[in-house]
Amino acid sequence: MERKELIRTIYLYLFSLIGLVLITIGTVRLVNLGLRTWVFTKADDMVVYPAYPKRVVEVAPGQTKEETLTPEEEEKYRREQEEYEAKNRRRERERTAAESLAMIIVGTPLFLYHWKVIERTKEEKRLGV
C-alpha cells in the first residue's frame, strides 16, 4: 500500500469514527434528556436552601438598618425563586436538546459519506477496478 493511499485510508476511517462518535454522543444526550424529563422527573430538581434577603431601611441620613421581610414578601420572594428555577431548567433542557440534535445532524452525513467512500473503495479493490 503506497503512502498516499494509507493516508487516505486513515483519513476516511478517522472521519467516519468522528461522525459515529458525534451520533452516539448526541443520541445518548437525547435519551438522557428524555429519561430526566419523563421517567426520572426528580433528577432535575434543585435543592436550594432559602436565603431570604433583608430589607435595608435608612433611619437617618447616612444610617441604615436591616429589617426582616414580612411573611408576604418572603412568600413573593420564594415564588420568584421557584419561577426562576423552572425557567432555568427549561432553558437547560432546550439547550441540551439543541446541542444533541446538532451533533446528530452533523455526525450523520459525516459518517455516512466517509463510510460510503470506504465501502466503494473496498468494492473497487475486490473487483480489481
Image (tube, helix red, strand yellow):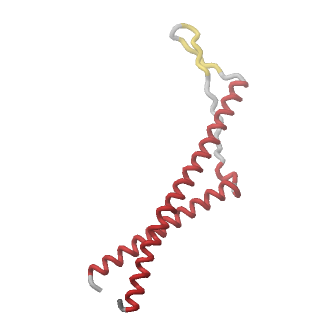
Query: Which quadrant would the C terminus be assigned to in this image?
Result: bottom left
Task: Give the residue at x 66% y 22%.
Answer: 68
Residue 65's place in the image compared with 110, above or below, is above
* Viewer-closest of 6 and 82: 6
- Percent position (x, y) of residue 8? 33, 76
The answer to whether residue 63 is left or right of residue 122 is right
Q: Position of residue 63 (x, y in %)?
A: 54, 11
- Give whichever of 124, 47 is nearer the camera: 124
Q: Nearer the viewer, residue 119 or 35?
A: 119
Q: Decide: is 92 above or below 72.
A: below
Q: Nearer the viewer, residue 105 or 127?
A: 127
Residue farthest along the top direction in this orientation: 61
* Residue lying at 72% horizontally and 24% vertically, measured from the top left: 72
User: Residue at image x 52%, y 7%?
Assistant: 61
**Vertical side of 85 occupied by 123: above or below:** below
Where in the figure is residue 71, as x and y percent of width and height?
73, 25
Look at the picture and state if 99 lies above or below 69. below
The residue sitting at the front extreme is 129
Image coords of residue 122 (percent x, y): 41, 85
| Quarter location, residue 15 | bottom left
